[in-house]
Amino acid sequence: MKKLFKGIVKLVFFIVFVLFVMTGIDYYRMRNGLVPIFNKSYYNSKTRIQTYKGVFYEAKRQYFASVREPLEESSDIHFYLFTLPLPLPSLKKEVDNSYQIISEEVSNCSQGSYLYYADLNQKVYFYCISGLSIKDNGKTINTVSSDVIDKLKDQMDFMGLLKDQTTMYFQLEEGDVSPLGLSLYQCNSYNVNDVYIGPKNMTFNDDFCTYKDDDFKFIYTIVDETPDNIQEVVDEEGNVIFETFYEDDLYYYQFNVPKSSYIFVETPEVRGKAATKTPLSVALSTGLITIKDLEDKGITFDSVKKVPDAVGLD
């Protein structure tokens, strides 16, 4: 009987020891910015309070966007051993001082937001700033791509969700990283994951996070499907007859072979829009693209002036 009692006591002490070890592990994790694991987790969606209940402890935090977010993006973090509060270090993210964001605020901002960059993943709008450049380890980046936006958000403080419960709000105080400070809204609704960037005092405007079909110039391509065996057209005297595919007040624009019917302006299926394929002649005549756009995309053609240069006239 005495051996059984000692065995039970040893088992109880062992269980208590293991539970204290588990408590210590979870406290250590929280001190290092990690969520505890040996517990049951509960959360209140109205107060955004998440509670971790272990056998010997209780921990709490107020999350901003999701219960899956890291502790460093949450606030009001506490750890109690029974009822005794244990100290936790500040978990505020350290800012990379080799990273600098240079922006120029527009003093008289009346035009609203404007599309600065777009790709197949995301659109980026500027509001009340005329530009944005990023210096990263001595390298200057002027293109605000999706990857750059992700790194930009890493430098900012997540301020929470807006009333729509989808749009995330980020802010960066004035300092070494950003002399003027910045605000950023990340949209997260159906077919709209746009980003809006502006000065620190930027507020959420009515046109933010609304669907806009305005990214054609960023996503279109010009596809040349001309067959390899296409031949020049010649007259009876052997002179090449050029194909005039477009004209304006000053010039005829010509190909040396009849190829305009094989050239298309295309856009991909993106952000809820169907893919498009527009013949070149239609795209030019309707103003969808310009001759300069055609030239910038690398399509080779000749420009023939309609009126010969005047000779001997001042």
Image (spheres, grey):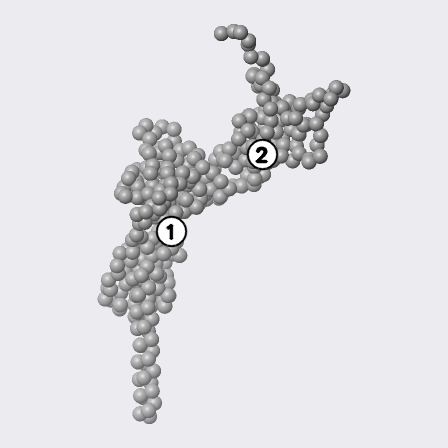
- The residue wearing badge 2 is 222
Q: Position of residue 286 (x, y in %)?
A: 57, 25
- The residue wearing badge 1 is 65
**Element at badge 1?**
loop
Give the quarter of the image for residue 124.
Answer: top left
Q: Would residue 293 be found to the left or right of residue 114 on screen? A: right
Give the quarter of the image for residue 185.
Answer: top left
- Whether residue 160 is visible to the viewer of this picture, yes or no, is no
> Residue 302, relative to residue 36: is it above or below?
above
Give the camera-side residue of 120 and 196. 120
Give amino acid for label 2: Ile
Mark 2 or 1 closer to N-term? Answer: 1
**Residue at far top of view:** 313
Give amino acid for label 1: Ala
Considering the image in quadrants, where does the N terminus appear? bottom left
Q: Position of residue 305 (x, y in %)?
A: 58, 17
How packed is label 2: few (under 14 Cα within 10 Å), some, or many (20 or more)? Answer: many
Give the camera-side residue of 210 and 218. 218
Give the quarter of the image for residue 237.
Answer: top right
